[in-house]
Image (cartoon, rainbow, N blue to C red):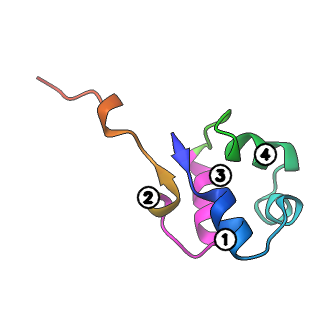
Amino acid sequence: MQNKIQELRKSRKVTQSELADAVNVTRQTIISLENGRYNASLLLAHKIARYFNMTIEDIFLFDDESDEKPE
């Protein structure tokens, strides 16, 4: 799953530490999210979306091809 966290953070001049503090995680978690090594929990995704005043879907890009479709 890709995300726009780094792009949003830089455009709003927010440091990784500031974002981490705001959503109550470590800076390392933000780094891992930005590098695609970690997928946010629904709760964390919600906190990040609220921080940027956006929807989860606007920040986190879900890969539709990986979705299982019932037959």
At label 1, the amino acid type is: Tyr
Indicate whether 1 appears above or below 48.
above
Q: Which residue is drawn at 81% across and 51% down?
A: 25
Q: In which quarter of the image is residue 4?
A: bottom right
SS for callout 2: helix
Asked if residue 58 lies left or right of residue 12, the reply is left
Q: Give the range drawn in magenta.
A: 42-56
Q: Do the residues labelled 2 and 4 touch (CB within 8 Å)?
A: no
Q: Mark 2 points at which residue?
A: 57
For disc 1, the neighbor class at 10 Å (few under 14, some 14 to 19, many from 20) is few
Where is residue 7? Give x, y as percent.
64, 62
Would residue 55 be counted in the magenta stretch?
yes
What element does badge 4 sit on? helix
Disc on the earlier residue, 1 or 4:
4
* Image-quadrant location for residue 15: bottom right
Q: What is the number of the mark on residue 51?
A: 1
